[in-house]
Image (spheres, rainbow, N blue to C red):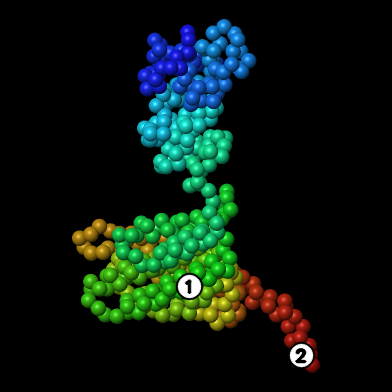
């Protein structure tokens, strides 16, 4: 069988036995053995591997028929990719676009690996260009990460979308996302806003990987500015909700108020992770008296009013916990005020949340629930704050609690500690001996 180098390339047909001058014997360990009829001109021009195998310099070139039969051993999983590669050698050219060569990510990856192995630069380039441009599914992305790094520098463009970016770019997108996440966009953009909040939390959370963004002073300053703007909106809503507009306007303003409260609940979680909750807690403590007064004036049989109470409770639980466990240090008078303001509010809100609330006679019952852990957190936090107050203030709070027949929150622990401390106070402080000496004199 003589090589037919003078035959025009356009007349070559993959697998045409009548015109072929070379056989590629494709085999695997499972016993599969296929003879594929090819043309030496095509293989030599587009594959350095075949060019070497078919050259006079190949060690076995003198053996009878060795130049007319090239054996290729491959894995069963790569078998079809080898056949596809051989077929592509007949169509690849500078005039053929990548999307005509590759049809999906899995096939392109398989052909890319074989093309690298058989030194087919045009096929490698076509696969790289295809994979760099098309979208990937999650499973495909993992497969790309497994295969592409082994290909070499020519495949680096494929991984461009997975490369880490510098911190300045991360900071810019974080700040933009945080501003949007604390803004008041139209309701149609609510899902986008929720996504922004989720991704911000993901960016600063340490899990299997280090946080994407380190909360340095520049980041904290930007976040504080956004929180200040959020509080400005909060104050505006608080003022508007105290007015007496028409009913439709009341509903809209209550809706805006609920949205701001939801944002503040989320913001507190972010500030906690970044260890910058102090300003938030102090501001919340300063507005607590007015906030409690406004919310308590809302009609508790109206659904919106109960929703607002729920949101206020969620934010306040975090603030009270930060105070109770010393995350933020407040003066004694301010801590006492927080207990006197919020303990009755929480006590009055719990039965409203735990019981059904009707919007009107025609609608079904609507029930709002608060995670039981929040009520437990309130109890623990209140106990911690109370036990850190002067004993006389403790006695006043506990007297009021007992007068309510021990209703929620359960302050039994604080009561027991107060009783013990009060009984042994003189002895522990060394006052008993002093009084006895004064009596003898």
Disc 2 on helix, strand or loop? helix
Q: Using the image as rendered, state which of residue 257 and residue 366 is in the foreground.
A: 257
Number of other residues with Cα within 10 Å of mark 2, as a class: few under 14, some 14 to 19, many 20 or more = few
Q: Is residue 361 above or below residue 8?
A: below
Q: Residue at x 54, y 22 (%)?
A: 51
Q: Is residue 287 above or below residue 145?
A: below
Report the residue marked by disc 2.
438
Identify the image quadrant of residue 391.
bottom right
Q: Using the image as rendered, state which of residue 319 and residue 391 is in the foreground.
A: 319
Percent coordinates x, y for residue 316 in the rendering: 46, 69
For residue 149, the mark is none
For residue 225, the mark is 1
Q: Residue at x 42, y 29 (%)?
A: 92
Identify the image quadrant of residue 146.
top right
Identify the image quadrant of residue 388.
bottom right
Disc 1 on helix, strand or loop? helix
């Amino acid at each position: 069988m003589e090589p037919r180098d003078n035959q025009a390339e356009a007349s070559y047909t993959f697998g045409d036995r009548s015109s072929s001058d070379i056989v590629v014997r494709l085999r695997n360990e499972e016993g599969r053995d296929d003879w594929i009829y090819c043309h030496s001109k095509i293989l030599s021009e587009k594959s350095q591997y075949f060019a070497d195998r078919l050259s006079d310099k190949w060690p076995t070139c003198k053996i009878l028929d060795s130049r007319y039969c090239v054996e290729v051993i491959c894995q069963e999983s790569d078998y079809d990719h080898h056949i596809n590669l051989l077929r592509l050698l007949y169509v690849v050219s500078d005039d053929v676009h990548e999307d005509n060569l590759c049809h999906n990510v899995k096939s392109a990856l398989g052909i890319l690996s074989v093309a690298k192995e058989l030194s087919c630069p045009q096929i490698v380039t076509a696969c790289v260009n295809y994979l760099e441009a098309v979208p990937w599914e999650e499973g495909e992305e993992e497969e790309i990460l497994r295969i592409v790094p082994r290909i070499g520098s020519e495949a680096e463009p494929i991984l461009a979308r997975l490369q880490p970016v510098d911190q300045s770019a991360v900071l810019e997108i974080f700040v933009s996302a945080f501003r949007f996440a604390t803004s008041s966009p139209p309701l149609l953009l609510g899902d986008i806003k929720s996504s922004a909040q989720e991704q911000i939390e993901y960016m600063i959370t340490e899990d299997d990987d280090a946080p994407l963004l380190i909360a340095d002073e520049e980041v904290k300053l930007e976040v504080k500015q956004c929180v200040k703007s959020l509080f400005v909106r909060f104050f505006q809503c608080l003022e508007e909700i105290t007015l007496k507009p028409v009913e439709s306007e009341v509903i809209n303003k209550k809706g805006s108020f609920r949205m701001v409260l939801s944002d503040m609940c989320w913001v507190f979680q972010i500030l906690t992770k970044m260890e910058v909750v102090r300003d938030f807690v102090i501001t919340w403590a300063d507005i607590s008296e007015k906030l409690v007064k406004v919310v308590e004036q809302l009609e508790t049989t109206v659904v919106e009013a109960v929703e607002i109470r729920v949101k206020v409770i969620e934010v306040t639980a975090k603030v009270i916990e930060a105070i109770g466990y010393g995350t933020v240090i407040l003066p004694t008078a301010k801590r006492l005020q927080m207990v006197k303001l919020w303990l009755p509010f929480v006590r009055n809100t719990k039965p409203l949340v735990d019981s059904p609330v009707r919007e009107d006679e025609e609608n079904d019952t609507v029930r709002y629930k608060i995670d039981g852990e929040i009520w437990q957190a309130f109890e623990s936090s209140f106990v911690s704050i109370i036990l850190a107050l002067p004993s006389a203030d403790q006695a006043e709070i506990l007297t009021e609690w007992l007068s309510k027949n021990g209703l929620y929150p359960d302050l039994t622990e604080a009561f027991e500690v107060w009783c013990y401390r009060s009984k042994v106070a003189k002895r522990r402080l060394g006052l008993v001996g002093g009084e006895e000496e004064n009596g003898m004199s």
